[in-house]
Every structure is written in C-alpha cells, then in structure tokens.
Image (cartoon, grey):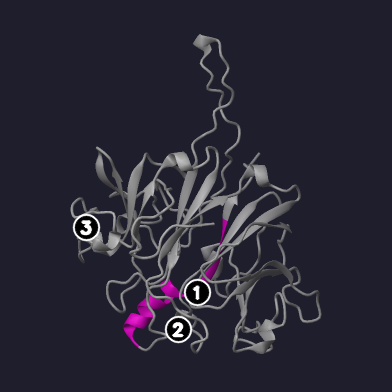
Amino acid sequence: MTRLSMVRGGFLPVSLLLAIAGVGCGESDGGVVDMGRDLGSPTDMGPEDEGVDLGPMLPLAQVRVVHGVSDLLTATNVPINGIRLCVEVAGLGVIALPPNADLLDEIDLRLGLPFRAVTPYQETLPLSTVRVYDEARVDNDAVGAIQPAVTCPTAGLDANCGDDTVPCLFSFPFDPSTLERGESYSLVVSGFRDNTNTCLAGTVPCPTGAISATLEQDEDVDDVVAGSARVRFVHSIHNLPPADLCYDLDGLVLDGAAPTIIHAAVATGDISGYATVPAVTTGMVFLTLKNPLDASTLTGNCALSSTLAASGLPSNVVPVFFSPANAMAMPPDVTPSIAAGTIITVYAMGDARYATPMGATQDDIDNFVGRTPLVLSFVDYAPAAP
C-alpha cells in the first residue's frame, strides 16, 4: 500500500494517476458497470523493416479512481459533493477530469466524480501535477444552471496545496514511469473531515482533515487461482471500529456451520491484501464489527454479537451487497456473487452516524441516503464471456 497524502499535506512523495472516462458504479442510479478487464494478449510491436523482433510490448499501466469521502460538504447539512481532479501538464496548462460532459447516461459527471463511485480502468496521463478538489469549490453549480461550468484554477498554484488561492484537498506529482507497464492500480480517495460526533462514545477516534489518497496495485488475470476467487477489503468508514470480512454458506443459521474468515480485523482507512476464497454464491458475505462496547464481538474472528438488530441479524453484522440495486431492494438482497476465476474488491463507505434515519430536520433526511454506511463489491477482473 502506498499512502500518498494527508489533507493539505503538501507535495506527495509518490507519483501516480489516471484519466477518468466514466464511472463504474455509483449509488446515484443503482446501475452497475462490469469492471472486469483482461490485460493479457499484448501485441507484438517489433519493427518488421529492421528485421528485429523486440518481443511483446506490454500495454500502459491502467488506473481507476475510487471516491470514498463521505462528508465533502459546502455547509453543515448539504448533501455530499463530488471530487474534481485538475491535471497540470507542463506546456499544456490545466485540464479538468471529468470534463464538462455527460460521459455516461447514468451519472452526470459535470458535478464531479460522485461519492461511492469506482471508475473503469483508464490509461495513465503524461508527466503532470494533479490536484484533487471538492468539486463545489471550483465549478459553477448555481441552482438552475443548465450546464454547470467545469473550471480548474490556473493561477495561484504552488507546491503546497493549502497555500493555493483556491485550496485543494491534496496534490501530487504523476510520473507514468513509476507504474509498471501492463499492471492495474486503484487510487482510493478516502478519509473523514468532520470530527463533531463521538464515534462509538469516544472509543473510536474520528480524524479531522484525514482525507488522503492511497495507490494500490490491483490483481489481474495472472493472479487468478483456478476454481477460486481472490478477494480484497477496503475499510473506508472512518467512524466504525475494525472489521472482519467473512462469509457463511448457510446464511448465519444458528445451528449451521460457523462463519469463515476472509480478512481479520481490518482497521478503518486500511486496505487488505487479496485472499483466496472458494466461490460463494449462497448464504451471505458480511462484515463483523469489533465493537469495544460489546464484549461478544471481541471473542475471535467473525465473532457475532449476542445482541440482535431490528433486522434479526447480530447487531455487529453489516451485509456486503453485490450491486447497488440489491442494497436498495425491499427487503435488501444479500445474495452473494463471488464466482470462481474472478478478482473482487469489497469497499465499505459511508458515515456511521447515518446508520439509521435521523429525521430531525429536512437536511438530515436529504443526507441520509447519500451518507448511509454501505458495503459494495466491485469486480477487478472477470474472464471475458465466451
């Protein structure tokens, strides 16, 4: 794992980044785009006219972006904003990503990359400096605007993001030579800015100004284990305790087999490695939270709380949903879908204060759906259909 920056942390020591051309999955519309891709079968680029075979030329590295910051707000109770990436290339100026267009029918990217979105993989940019902004700080999103103007600051820029005329969340240099050709990466933008709640009665700290980016190399076809899947977990709900990622083929039947651990005690803000698991298409995949206020959750891997929630599940169990539509169904559909031969990342994103409807004000109601804690599964690699 490469941690790139803290909020206003200045210049980043590690370079990377991306070109966004669309959104893989977002809560906005309930749609799902298959993120699987095959980076194999490179083309032989040897120059025939010289009679020299230079061997296969690997494609450029690919990068996707994940927006996991649940509380980018222009005011106390305004729904979540998107993020805008502004890319400065020497001699070419500053360009905005996503550009001023609807790149996919499902999501309007003129308002930035939405929260809980995972973009498709895209080839990387030239040598550049990338600044990540709260989209509402840089674009014209006036009420009633037919086509909000996408603008990136072009003046008042320096190496320290916090000293810019228009402050950005963080910035970093991108050097494509630092990425391995033929490999794929995820740039996970995560964190939690608001420290106004106690976070489990003060037992779990809620960091203020902890928005950062982590560049993580993703697995692909070369890492597939025959007959099994590879699964990784990103814990990005910053006011929840550490969590185990587990599965149970009988769906937590009380007299059935015990749950099976996939990843143990992943702390908030952390990204696990990949684990090999069998295909899981029945029962449930879920998190078990290790709540320091509930001793029954601390007895071992996949420990279930002795206190039941209104759903009938142990109170520390958070289901993993395999599409936004499943999460929004009534009742929610927790049927797992981990197929053999696939590589999957499970992302936990949201704000634990919105685990139940708040309803005190209209602002709370407006924020509830967008900030509800949700655990979604995305496909890093899936075999192409025959």
Looking at the rendered image, the disc whose residue lies closer to the viewer, 2 or 3, is 2
* Distance in Å between CA atoms under marks 2 and 3: 32 Å
Q: Secondary structure at mark 1?
A: loop
Pick whichever of labels 2 and 3 is earlier in the sequence.
3
Q: Is residue 208 left or right of residue 272?
A: left
Pick whichever of labels 1 and 2 is earlier in the sequence.
2
Pick whichever of labels 1 and 3 is earlier in the sequence.
3
What x and y, as percent, mark residue 117?
45, 59
Magenta segment? 361-378
In the image, residue 279 lies in the stretch drawn in magenta: no
What x and y, as percent, mark residue 215?
49, 54
Q: Secondary structure at mark 3?
A: loop
Quickly name the residue at label 2: 357
Quickly name the residue at label 3: 146
**In the picture, residue 322 is in which quadrant?**
bottom right
In the image, residue 367 lies in the stretch drawn in magenta: yes
Give the amino acid at mark 1. Answer: Pro
**In the picture, residue 366 is in which quadrant?**
bottom left
Give neighbour class at mark 1: few <14, some 14-19, many 20+ (Cα, 10 Å).
many
Give the amino acid at mark 3. Answer: Ile
